[in-house]
Amino acid sequence: MNCIFCKIIKKEIPCNLLYEDESCFVFLDIKPITKGHTLVVPKKHSENLLDIEEKDVLHCMNLIKKLGPKIMKAMKADGFNVGQNNFSAAGQTVMHTHFHIIPRYKNDGLKNWQNKDTSADALLQAEKEIKKALRVP
């Protein structure tokens, strides 16, 4: 497999390792959005959130809950974002499921998602389409 995260986990490529256990690898992002930007990566390869085993998602989330505040404190951040991208259209650049812990600072210049005004009709149409897709056969 030619996955860069699998190579990092196998220690074929160096990283700034922060934490490791039997099923996760936690290290600094080499192209950080802010100081302390951290990646939480399950050791077992999966491509995205649709592909990962439930136990691995739960373990990653528990780690994020435990490590996020400690990273925030260490970086003297004012908050943190947790991010996870699925498919290239959503910004996923490494096709190995991973989660971002991004320390945030007051006046860090980063913009949060830009909300858009929408009509009641557009919301109703989206609601109908999503509810139709959610119906279990």
Image: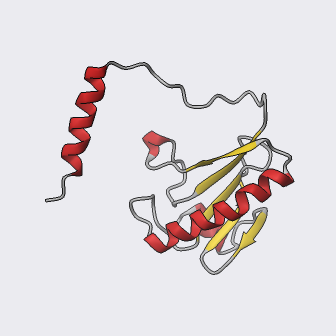
Tell me if 37 is positioned left or right of 119 in this view.
right
Residue 49 in picture, x, y percent from top left: 44, 58
Residue at 43%, 40% (x, y): give it.
89
- At a point 45% along the width and 50% down the height, the residue shown is 86
137 or 24: which is nearer to us?
137
Quarter in which the C terminus is drawn = bottom left
**Residue 81 screen position, x and y as percent:** 65, 45
Nearer to me, 2 or 113: 113
The residue lying at 54 percent from left, 25 percent from top is: 114
Query: In the image, residue 62 lies at what x, y percent?
Result: 61, 67
User: For this view, does 8 lie left or right of residue 35?
Assistant: left
How many numbered marks, from 0 up? Answer: 0
Whether residue 112 is visible, yes or no, is yes
Q: Is residue 72 above or below residue 25?
A: above
The structure's colour scheme is secondary structure
Identify whether 88 is placed above or below 107. below
Instruction: Pick the residue in front: 14 or 22.
Output: 22
Pinpoint residue 6: horizontal percent, then vertical percent. Answer: 58, 68
Can residue 1 be seen in this snapshot? no
Is 99 placed left or right of 80 in the picture?
left
Q: Which image quadrant is residue 40 in? A: bottom right
